[in-house]
Image (tube, grey):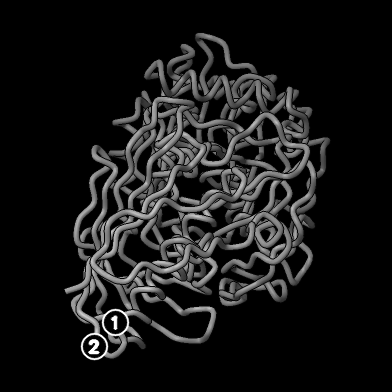
Amino acid sequence: MVQVRQSTIVDAPIAQVWQVLRDFNGHDRWHPAVATSTIERGEPVDAVGSVRRFCLSDGGELREQLLAMSDKDFTLTYCLLEAPLPLIGYVASIRLKSVTDGDRTFWEWRSEFEPPSQRRDELVQLVTRDIYQSGFAAIRAMFGAPMARAQTGPQRASPSETVVAAPLKAAIATSARTRAIVVERYGGPETLRLADIALPPLGPSEVRLRHAAIGVNFIDVYCRTGYFDLLKPPGVPGMEAAGIVEALGSNVRDFAVGERVAYACPPVGAYCERRNMSTEFLVRVSDDISDDVAAASLLKGVTASFLLHEVHPVKAGEVILVHAAAGGVGQLLTQWARRLGATVIGVVSSDEKAQIAGNLGAHHVVVSSREDFSQATLTITGGSGADVIFDAVGVDTFAGSLNALAVRGHLVSFGQASGAVGAWDIDRLAAKSISISRPNYGHFTDSQEKLGRNVDRFFTAVREGAIRVGHPRRYDLAFASDAHRELESRRTTGALILTP
């Protein structure tokens, strides 16, 4: 049995290095020998027992299984299941330790295996040089450190000359590729196609992100159908995601590799494993907010923030009606408006959703499949009507919403899940002196000041308990079309995310 042990020092904090290495499906993003990597059966990347399938740069394929992982000890162990080389019984482990001098990281990579005697030296050299030392060099380059010789530990084999891989910064910046969902033409969910695409060179003020979770929102549907012109086919949809910074443009000083960030803004392009993004609209994600929650709620939370505080600043004592109160934005509006002192009427389509809206704090819940929400609202308010109605449904509810408003009431139409409302004679609004708003998300988030104000307001509300964000429903990136079908069916409650 041969034992190989290699180690090096990475000029980065241990948490940042571990964030990269713990991703059992992440080698294709940093190791020069790996072209693509896929976790079989869509299992989580940190699930013990998960199997990754590599396609190597030379065309070979291999499969490895995760045997153990500890975030506390910064260790993981894996074994080789299939390979084009006879590395019999190959078991390897990675171990990180903090180096207090300069907040650096000690990384040990070791393995044991049984090679055929006639190929012993060849295979030991391959593992030492082409796997471990090339990997060390890649990670050092990713974190911006100069190339240095790896430290060679004891090994029961003939020592081989240390070969240092070429710096990878140029490769990261110019030749990266990613899996992505591409809209080839406007249309239904079937137009969402998984493809392998090239990423453009990293701009001076951009960072390259590796997504951990991607938000699915109705604005993505509008982009896919062509109702919004944010996406020009062929293009990648999506405006919301969370992940880590993988590489930095030459002018970036405010972010570091390994830092957790999120965004909820144009340009579209979030439905992918990796992307380039301007730092202008990135927000840092604190440790008390998970990637899933950030990706599932940031866009919806920013939307709820400007709807409740800028489009119609809700006052204590007002009566508000929230359509789709069990949906993604609806849940946030319901909780937040109650916290602001409003009386909340939640409109839902089923008894199951009624229970959700009630649990979130709606004072009154109307099930629209069996009663007219407009008449129910007038009954609840003693004929006065609602002061403001937040309507993301569209044509199916527009007329009823106008009827359910109070004198000088405000209809905020911020979506059209059931279709466009069509043309209306504005003279009809005079009967109650009704005002109507049709806010555009981009107009409330098109500067760092605007976006930052709403992000801070939302995250503060989450931390203070004014808003509870539920666990989102997860879909593999490859099944984005299924997520869109569920969203458009209006059968969903809460948020949906894609996992790359």
The residue at 74%/59% (across/down) is 227
Query: Residue 433 in the image: x percent, y percent?
Result: 75, 23
Nearest the viewer among 485 and 251 is 251
Q: Is residue 251 visible?
A: yes
Indicate the secondary structure of the residue bearing disc 2: loop
Q: Give the residue pinned by disc 2.
A: 116
Query: Vertically, is 458 above or below 393?
Result: above
Circle 2 crowding by C-alpha within 10 Å: few under 14, some 14–19, many from 20: few
175 to the left or right of 391: right
Nearest the viewer among 415 and 230 is 230
43 to the left or right of 332: left
Query: Residue 91 in the image: x percent, y percent?
Result: 22, 68
The residue at 52%/44% (across/down) is 244
Q: Is residue 372 visible?
A: no
The residue at 56%/69% (across/down) is 179
Q: Amino acid at mark 1?
A: Arg
